Amino acid sequence: MANGQGGGGGNGGVYAILIIIVILILAAVLYMSGAFGGGDDATDINADVNIENPVGDGGGGGGGNE
């Protein structure tokens, strides 16, 4: 250990980068799930989607009980 290298065998940097990436992914998941103080009614998304049936005979549809 007199040469200035630690006992990690030269892989310490790789492990450090992997740990940082895992922490960032975990923080992003927690942030998206609202674990950091979100979740009030002002931040909820209310998406009303209205899908109308086309006017016509309805031909070309997917089967039926015949």
Image (cartoon, rainbow, N blue to C red):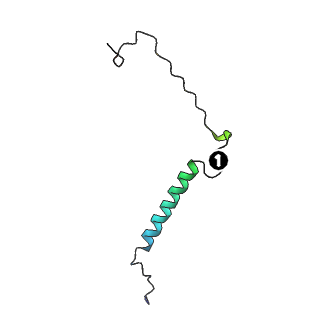
- Where disc 1 sits, the SS reads loop
Q: Residue at x 48, y 65 (%)?
A: 19
Pick the front one: 57 or 4:
57
| x 46%, y 66%: residue | 17
Q: Please state which of residues 9 and 33 is positioned toward the viewer in this rendering.
A: 33
Going by the picture, which residue comes out furthest to the left?
66
Residue 7: which quarter of the image?
A: bottom left
Q: Residue 47 at what x, y percent from top left?
A: 58, 31
Q: Which x, y percent locates residue 43?
A: 64, 41
Quarter where residue 1 is shown: bottom left
Task: Give the x, y percent position of residue 35.
Answer: 60, 51
Which quarter of the figure is the C terminus placed in?
top left
Q: Is residue 7 above or below residue 2?
A: above
Q: For the point 60% across and 36% down, which residue is it?
A: 45
Q: How many marks?
A: 1
- Residue type, mark 1 in image: Gly
Left/right placement of residue 17 relative to residue 34 reads left
- Residue at 53% across / 51% down in the picture? 29
- How busy is the neighbourhood of tag 1: few (under 14 within 10 Å), some, or many (20 plus)? few
Which residue is farthest front?
65
Location of residue 21 with respect to 50 vertically, above or below:
below
Q: Nearer the viewer, residue 14 or 26?
A: 26
Q: Position of residue 51 (x, y in %)?
A: 51, 22
Say which residue label 1 marks: 38
In the displayed structure, would residue 59 be above or below residue 1? above
